[in-house]
Image (cartoon, helix red, strand yellow):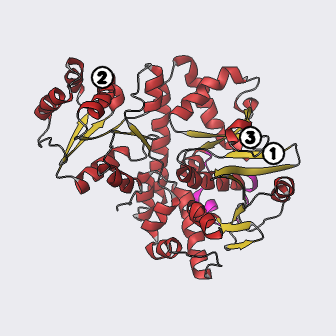
Amino acid sequence: MRIERDIIQTLKIWKNAPDRKPVLLKGARQTGKTWVMETFGKECFEYCAKFDFDRQPELKSVFQASKNPDRIIKELTLYCQVPILPGKTLIIFDEIQECEEALNSLKYFYEDAPEYHVVAAGSLLGVAVKRRNMAVPVGKVRILKLYPITFKEFLRASDAATYNYVNALQEIQRLPEIILNKLRTEYRRYQVSGGMPEAVVALLGDKGLGAVEATLQDILDLYELDFAKYAEARDIPRIHAIWHSLPAQLSKENRKFIYKVVKAGARSKDYEDALMWLEDAGMIYRVYNVNKPGIPLSAYQETDAFKVYACDCGLLRRLAHLPATVVTDPIANYTEFKGAMAENVVLQSLIPLTDDQLPFYWTSGATAEVEFVMQYGTAVVPIEVKAENNISGNSLSEYNKKYHPKYRVRFSMLNLQFNDGLLSCPSPLAGWLDVLLRLVG
């Protein structure tokens, strides 16, 4: 089955932009970058010319011989079966990390041949650029980030009627119970598969949980191979240790990243490069603590206090060996990790709304913690996340007494309502938070 990806609409707008730059598509492995480029080419152009620098290493000589786009195009026509015509052909450079000269050529396509539509992507592009000290033509390309399939995209494929109902909301009001129950069901199913396209297709295509689990395990195994292939030898065991410590890190009541959970006696200076490798690979998100929710939030960031989340809740679940049947059972008791899963899924929904700007979190000594704080225009919005219907706790109230925010948000499995500045929102609607905040004014 086909899952509609929102980034296709972004690319359609890019296609007709007068100041168009070549696109560099980034994202974690297995998020569907090649599929997105090929689908966009087939739907929006007469021709699609794809060049894969991993499968066709001989292509490198084309870019090593010249920086002139016209000459490059003439030579590339020898390697494809379709004409390369301005405005009619989408040029795809896949696995571009294998050819630094091709990466640099994007600058010259922008400056000297803007009439061509060029999109490029690569596996572990951020890692490769750093490791090989490659130059990215900053300012000459448009960098787009492809995330795992979001719950919004998942819901559109799994239950179009419920998606359309939510997408048409014009005011903050309680959802009909039938809609809320459908959202809860699909949200729990989403936590089983996560957002990796192959796993989502296995679930929604009714291939069975065995196929979902096998797909997720294959991706985890591929990531393990990436450690060995793309990381420095001294960092491989550290990257492995951090990655496998995520379930234990997030199962703590205080989810702040603790190095000794990775390994007894571990020090930050020994593991910083490994953390950055996982970030560059798009496999983890680091959410930093702020000591004060001021604008800009980054000015109040505490660099030595952070939480680490997985890029995808399905991979996190599989990494933790958490059975799918536990996740789909609303009364299952897996305490702290249930809260961690709830936070991870909400985070996955929020990041695409903030143009890849990660939220922060706020603590007040050992007495209060608000899971996320994010900028919304000139306001800072505190966001509390509850796994189910239990909304006890005083952290959000303490934050409110101290800072008096215009809005505050609580995600749980309770119904939608807005009262006295508090937006109580079903967690499945996290991907619509920007819309809901506009509705409350």
Indicate the quadrant containing the N terminus: top left, top right, bottom left or bottom right.
bottom left
- Residue type, numbered disc 1: Thr
Q: Nearer the viewer, residue 393 or 237?
A: 393
Question: Does residue 297 sit above or below 179 in this rendering?
Answer: above
Q: Which residue is mark 3?
A: 289
Residue 293 percent location from the top left of the image: 75, 46
- Based on the displayed image, in which of its 4 quarters is residue 12 positioned? bottom left
The reply to whether residue 252 is in sight is: no
Tell me which segment is drawn in magenta: 320-336
* Above/below status of 141 relative to 424: above
Circle 2 is placed at which residue position?
101
Identify residue type, mark 2. Glu
Secondary element type, mark 3: strand
Q: Earlier in the sequence, mark 2 or mark 1?
A: 2
Q: Are marks 2 and 3 in contact (CB under 8 Å)?
A: no
Q: Secondary structure at mark 1?
A: strand
Q: Is residue 329 magenta?
A: yes
Q: Residue 87 appears at what percent x and percent y? A: 19, 47
Q: Earlier in the sequence, mark 1 or mark 3?
A: 3
Compute the Cα span from label 2 to label 3.
40 Å
Please report contact status of discs 1 and 3: CB closer than 8 Å, yes or no.
yes
- Type of residue at label 3? Asn
> Badge 1 local density, few (<14 within 10 Å), some, or many (20+)?
some
Residue at image point 32% right, 29% down: 107
State the residue position of label 1. 363
Query: Which quadrant would residue 393 be assigned to in this image?
Result: bottom right
Q: At 65% from the left edge and 67% from the top edge, which residue is drawn?
A: 441
In this view, 140 is above or below 407 = above
User: On the rendered structure, is 112 left or right of 186?
Assistant: left
- Residue 157 belongs to magenta span: no
**Residue shown at the point (66%, 50%) measured from the top left:** 374
